[in-house]
Amino acid sequence: MPAATTRHPESSTLTLEGAELGNLELRAALEGIAYTLADLAECFPMESDVARSILTERQKVLRDELARRERLYAGGVDVPDPYAAEHDAWLSLAGDVRRRADVLSIFGDAGHVLSRAGWSNRRQAEEWVGACPWCGGRDRFHVWRGADPGYWCRGCGAGGDAITATRNLIPGCAGFYEAVAWLARQLGLPAPIAPHRPKGNGAGFEYVRGKVVPR
Ligand SMILES: [Zn+2]
């Protein structure tokens, strides 16, 4: 290692919703946004402008930050590799739970009542509607199951997947690791061992005998 390298003072300063973002959380957040944007573009091409502009704005910030960390790492600055292979297992698990988790029951577990709105041919999935947990709008909030489960509020633009729903609604699951581990537990999936104990918002679980349990 070159003797002169020092930790870049701004190497990990990006925060999202108040939490410092590690490299894995950053990449996972980008994957989540891409997933939700693709779904909204396909299923609500005309109506989802607000949600898409919020998500696109956030995507740009995250992409710029990831590119910045990549440049620092490639330039020999003493920062972690943003594309470290040790993150792959968690990213893969995040993708799995995003597609397989029952997003409707996440809202139900958090006490939000939704009623069946009908079958969406476009999604080939049942859609549910109710009051938005964020803006309170009475009839603008949609949740759907199917191949690409997720949620979206026509009023305030909140939109996301099972992971963002869990982080926002399930107590003790505000961090990426807790949320993914919680969803994996619901699905009976084993979670990987964390490459390092995450700091701050990322902490909150332990790996015990092949299962992830909350601390
Ligand atoms: Zn709303």
Image (tube, rainbow, N blue to C red):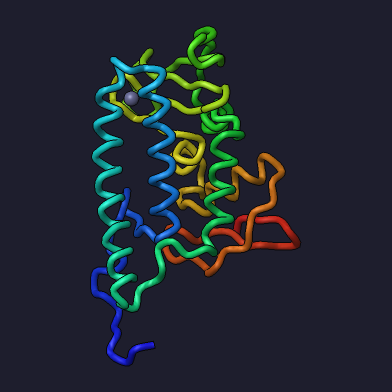
Residue nearest the viewer, comparing 127 with 6:
6
> In this image, 132 relative to 119: left or right?
left
Where is the C terminus found, in terms of image quarters?
A: bottom right
- In the displayed structure, 54 sits above or below 122; it is below
Locate residue 136, reporting x and y percent: 34, 23
Residue nearest the viewer, comparing 198 with 77:
77
> In this image, 166 relative to 60: left or right?
right
> In this image, 136 relative to 35: left or right?
left
Q: How many marks?
A: 0
Q: Residue at x 54, y 64 (%)?
A: 86
Locate residue 190, reporting x and y percent: 69, 51
Q: Quadrant of residue 72?
A: bottom left
- Residue at the front extreme, as displayed: 74
Locate residue 20, reporting x and y percent: 34, 59
- Ligand 1, what quadrant? top left
Residue nearest the viewer, comparing 126 with 4:
4
- Residue at the right extreme, as displayed: 209
- In the displayed structure, 45 sits above or below 65; it is above
> In this image, 126 relative to 134: left or right?
right
Q: Residue at x 51, y 16 (%)?
A: 123
Where is the N terminus found, in terms of image quarters?
A: bottom left
Locate residue 17, reporting x and y percent: 32, 48
Q: Residue at x 41, y 18 (%)?
A: 43
Q: Quadrant of residue 105?
A: top right
Q: Residue at x 40, y 29 (%)?
A: 38
